[in-house]
Amino acid sequence: MTTSEAPLSAPLDIGFDYTRSLGPTLSRFVTGLAGRRILGARSSDGRVHVPPPEYDPVTGAPLTELVEVAHTGTVTTWCRQPKPLAGQPLEHSFAWALVLLDGAATPMLHAVDAERVHTGMRVRARWAASSGNGIRDIACFGPIDDEPAVEPHDAEDVTMITTPVHLSYQHSASPEESRYLRGLAEGKLLGQRCPACEKVYLPPRGACPTDGVPTEEEVELPDHGIVTTFCIVNVPFLGQRIKPPYVAAYILLDGADIAFLHLVLGCAADEVRMGMRVEAAWKPRAAWGTTLENIDHFRPTGEPDAPYEAYARHL
Amino acid sequence: MSSDSPEVAIVSFAQAPNVRATHGTTNGVEMLVPIIREALAGAQLSKRDIGFWCSGSSDYLAGRAFSFIAAVDAIGAFPPINESHVEADAAWALYEAWVKIRTGEVDTALVYGFGKSSAGELRRVLAMQLDPYLVGPLWPDSVSVAGLQARLGIDGGLWSEHAMAEVAARSRAANPDAQVHERVTAEELLRRPYVADPLRAHDCAPITDGAAVVVLAAADRARELIARPAVITGIEHRVESSHLTARNLATSPSTVAAAKAAGADGITLAELHAPFTHQEILLRQALGLGDEVTVNPSGGALAGNPMFAAGLARIGEAATRVMAGAADRALAHATSGPALQQNLVCVLKGGD
Amino acid sequence: MKQRAAVLGVGQTHHRSKRLDVTMAGLCREAVDRALEDAGLSFADIDAVVLGKAPDLFEGVMMPELVLADAIGATGKPLLRVHTAGSVGGSTANVAASLVHGGVHARVLAVAFEKQSESNAMWALSIMPPFHMPVGAGAGGYFAPHVRSYIRRSGAPDHIGALVAVKDRRNGARNPYAHLRQADITLESVQASAMLWDPIRYDETCPSSDGACAIVLGDERAAAGRTVAWLHATAMRTEPTTFAGRDQVNPQAGRDAAAALWRQAGITDPLSQVDAAEIYVPFSWFEPMWLENLGFVEEGQGWKLTEAGETELGGRLPVNPSGGVLSSNPIGASGMLRFGEAAMQVMGRAGDHQVDGARIALGHAYGGGSQYFSMWVVGAEKP
């Protein structure tokens, strides 16, 4: 039994630059910003909202009447951001604020760059160096007397914006998974047996999927087994880490009750068969970590294929 | 509402210890396995007796698409089960289960919610709930949005930093089993620094990993299972405008509407899902809860805030006290979205 | 005790690989407006809204129903968000149906959408957390080995998958909303297309689409005096993704859901009694697999029905007259499109892809690792 240590964890970063089409109403707003104009939409009750909602907040009707409002306005509430988080408008302490622009009936949310902010403060938009980035064309707001007035100008239509989203997580493996991964780091394939149904799982699940109980009994498995079924991956895709074409196969180790997905190499892709007997081809020991990738791939052993009945109920 | 549909009652509640961080995974299995067992035992049911399963969780909290799928392993879902999932606090999963029992298709349901907030940077993750075109790209985090709402009320004379600190002091002292338990006065709390002026650390719910389970049954069945089920006499929810700044953030019209529709009168105990101190005051005002109403004896979200389970836990906590005979008529509230955009109210009464 | 429920109207968008002319709100609204018009109703008539979509990661918005509330007429009303992976469009319709069956609301709007072009579907489906072997190659890579298993178990000839692709794409050409509309596709052209995840070819694979679907459901009173599609049965079942002895080709959860469905609908011989079936076929081989899983034919016999042309528009059991998922796949909406298209059939509103005289139709959706199943039977007559 491997020692019980804290479960393994590793960073998981998810990022994508989302490309967003703006539709007719938001395009006009964003194009306005590109030309240093701020537009609002008049809703069914006559109120001008900035930014313009596409659909009325009360009736849901599409809002198409856009009116220009001033670059200046009044802070109606604020909240200090002493240490800005990634992606926020400024990198030094600033205040979030709802700013009621002159000409609008409801405020807009943005940042105010000032050491001291108060409700009722008069502010003016500060424009970014570049344009066409939607709400970020306004870099922030600043005290009305400190920010220069900027004249609007014509701008080419903007119909799309890109909004990068990057989030960082710390991924944790379960205690069962951690024991299995630490086993791999020592060149062992540790399956786990469910106390209720006695099936052996490799990799382990958080609990036995049919009984809902933790699987704690370790069973060391050999590094050979059979291919139950497989496909040949030809298609490249974003984020892919193995170069196609490659055989992705379900490997049922001798003694295991579920199969797991891995690579098959060591023969032509079209020679791989259901029932083919395979063995692990490990990477050099020095390259091992807490991962199934310690096994570089599975290769045919050359033995006769397993009969269909041996794996038919694993399909 | 049809009068032919059966009344629904809560027969048991279990929750995982609320902690700052578990070693467990974001799919919640480790937290769920023991409490599913506990909740079933409390209802004298086995998993085979459950007619419908429903859960609430969030992919973005976990940082994984389909993160709820692995949670199903905690159930032992074979033979296959009748099951659904909402991408929202499990209070809404409880609502879906309530509806299911009212159709008459099933007479028992198990609802669960889970969240491992410690995996990511929660306040930043929640910025993803904002309008992705014109608000989200600024990354206004959830604490800052709450701070804007808090100051609106302070400026408007609806509450004060002192009143907020009193809520915090009361919540922190309420429950020795909660994640946060501290005996402290409001004055002491006010001496602590701001984290996001006007908010101090005590004004914000802690980061919590946790999970909760509630078992429901049609009222007749419920009375066969336990002596005093908590009967749901009304459960309603409403959502407000997507346009954050078009809303009146100092009040909660959706909570008022939901409470009215649910028939929230004669309440003696309320569990309010308020991750910020000012929001408890705001909700109290909106619901017209006087000083005679006991609010958040559990400590509420301010004492432990397992995301996507906290609203369900409010219902469970209220139900527990009704089932124990400590309250006759209780209200539980759950919220979702930025600055109380969506709200659910559940009214419970003791059903002997 | 259970109230009767009916589909009052169905709407959908023009599905395309990129709908760059609209926001997510605009996309949903297009389907919602069409559904309300089809039902002859307005937002004021709707009591509650249920929205469904697949992982939030696709669009990079957490719980987008919150930002869509105004657009979909949910503001001030109850709003629910369902997420059951690929079956979500179907589950969403089932949840909306429950609200009516349970006597909670008289008229409910169900909406499902996906705007996949905001990111990249294969990227979103292939993100592997740490400690996982990065062998997965999207949905196609996941299902291809199980398709191979089906072929082996059933002894089906190689060309069956291509037959389905030809049929569904040609059907899509009759559907003005479909993403792929390929009237000229042939068996030869499909078999000549690139092998993506052997044994699944390019032309046997669903597209990645932006699209939305909306359905208006009502109770008996709301249905009075109208042409509607009555709900005869609904069913949902789930099983774990992986467990010892799991049948990945003919999952128990699907079989159980179908059995419960037919029982509820009073159908004893689905092949004879069902006039049209919209089933979730994102990779062409799933047609014969699901025909067996649903109990239309015995295990191993599904491909024979396809080969004999019985699943064509004029056949014994037209499958996917709309063109199905193979022609349009906005993932979150695809399940609801199946349910909605089934309703359109029995309402006689399927236009050029109408199955003559369709009185009973099936809508089916699946999701995850073939582990979530949701389905309904609708009929022209009150049940």
Image (spheres, grey):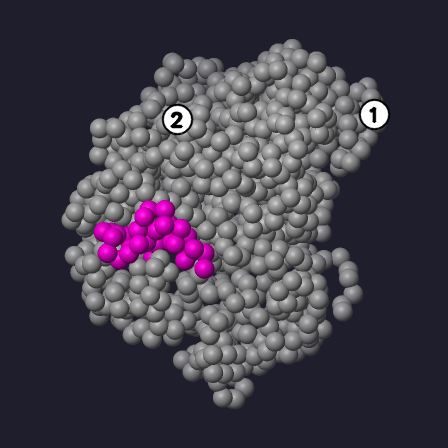
Left or right: C67 with respect to B210?
left
Q: Residue at x 32, y 48 (%)?
A: C266
Question: Tag 1: residue type?
Answer: Val
The stretch in magenta equals C252-281
Total marks shown come to: 2
Q: Is residue C10 visible?
A: no
Q: Quadrant of the C terminus of chain C?
A: top left
Label 1 Cα neighbours within 10 Å, binned few <14 / some 14-19 / many ≥20 = some
Say whether residue C166 is left or right of residue B247: left
- Percent position (x, y) of residue A136? 50, 34
**Closer-to-camera residue (C4/A65):** C4
Density class for disc 2 (Cα within 10 Å; few <14, some 14-19, many ≥20) is: some
In the picture, which quadrant includes the N terminus of chain C? top left
Does B169 sit above or below residue A191? above
Q: Position of residue B231 (x, y in %)?
A: 58, 28
Q: Residue C47 bears which disc, if any?
A: 2
Tag of residue C300: none
Query: With respect to residue C302, does C62 lie above or below?
Result: above
Secondary structure found at label 2: loop
Q: Quadrant of residue C96?
A: top left
Query: According to the image, label 1 marks what residue?
Result: B184
**Extreme residue toward the bottom, this view:** A303
Q: Position of residue C342 (x, y in %)?
A: 28, 46
- The chain containing the residue under callout 1 comes to B
Residue B187 at what x, y percent from top left?
82, 19
In the rendered structure, which amino acid carries the disc numbered 2?
Asp
Q: Residue furthest top?
A: B157
Residue drawn 55% across and 33% down?
B220
Magenta highlight: main SS:
helix
Residue B2 visible in the shown view: yes
Q: Residue at (53%, 74%) from the top-left corner?
A: A251
